[in-house]
Amino acid sequence: RSLPMRPPPPAMRTSPRLPLAVALGCVLRCACLSPGPSPRLAGEASMSRRAALVLPVPVLALAGRPAVATEYPCRTTSNPFFTTKTCYRVGLVEGRLGKCLADENCMSTSSVQSASKYSPPWDYTPETLNPDRAWKSLKLALLQTIQGARVEAEDVSTERLYLHVTAPSAVPPAGTDDLEFVLDPKEKLVFFRSASRSSVFLFPLQQPVSDNGRHLSRLQNVRSTLGWGSLSLEDMGLAQF
């Protein structure tokens, strides 16, 4: 008497295998999007009144994590035609907005020793003497005049107000610009820094591809929309800032 035949086991389902090129591309893309190592916080330093025009302001990220200054190590990628250097630096360093690096497209009220990267702070009193109103006007002007602008962080918990906004870069086209502002109600001034996260270097050039003054023209457009004034070092009575 023959035994009944057992039915064959069900076929195992296997996921389709990705082509090697596609898998490698996914790995590289994830690596490029990785935020990098944990940020380090810059300590607060004591300052004279002249240097204290911008006191340390905690930067409250939208996730709620405070930071005085956030900085990741710069990342560099290269191909046979150009090199891209990407740096992320926001927040206050020793009580003030950061200076511009020598090899980045940037404008800052802190870069007083670099004529090509320095721009004086703004005086908001032509519009109003009320700092709260000036702050609201600034945010509105940024969002209305800068295409793609987005508020990333804002701190109004201290006397001096801090704002971090991002916007699309001119160079590289898919890059991001960081714009930071500090409003000092005692001095009735607004300090700022506008910098591209990524700088592109064509071989064998040692300086980044220029954005043709995009940062300066964008800032001037915002100030013109607000109707605010612009100071100089002589107006401020400062040797350095």
Image (spheres, rainbow, N blue to C red):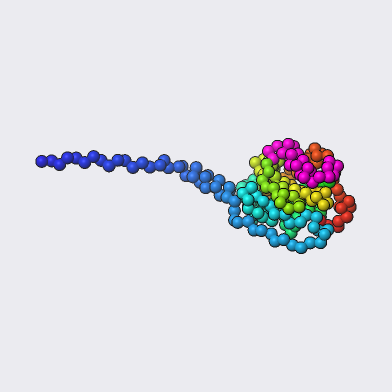
Q: Determine which quarter of the picture holds residue 57.
A: bottom right
Residue located at (57% from left, 50% from top): 34
Residue located at (66% from left, 55% from top): 67
Position in image of residue 31 (x %, y %): 56, 49
- Quarter in which the N terminus is drawn: top left
Q: Determine which quarter of the picture holds residue 7.
A: top left
Q: Main secondary structure of the magenta part?
A: helix
Residue 181 belongs to magenta span:
no
Between 221 and 160, the residue placed more toward the observer is: 160
Stretch in magenta: 125-149
Residue located at (76% from left, 56% from top): 55
Position in image of residue 30 (x %, y %): 55, 47
Q: Is residue 137 visible?
A: yes
Residue 141 belongs to magenta span:
yes
Position in image of residue 79 (x %, y %): 61, 47
Q: Residue furthest left?
A: 1
Residue 147 sits above or below residue 159 on the image: above
Residue located at (69% from left, 59% from top): 42
Q: Is residue 83 visible?
A: no
Between 106 and 194, the residue placed more toward the observer is: 194
Residue 137 sits above or below residue 110 on the image: above
Between 160 and 82, the residue placed more toward the observer is: 160
- Quarter in which the C terminus is drawn: bottom right
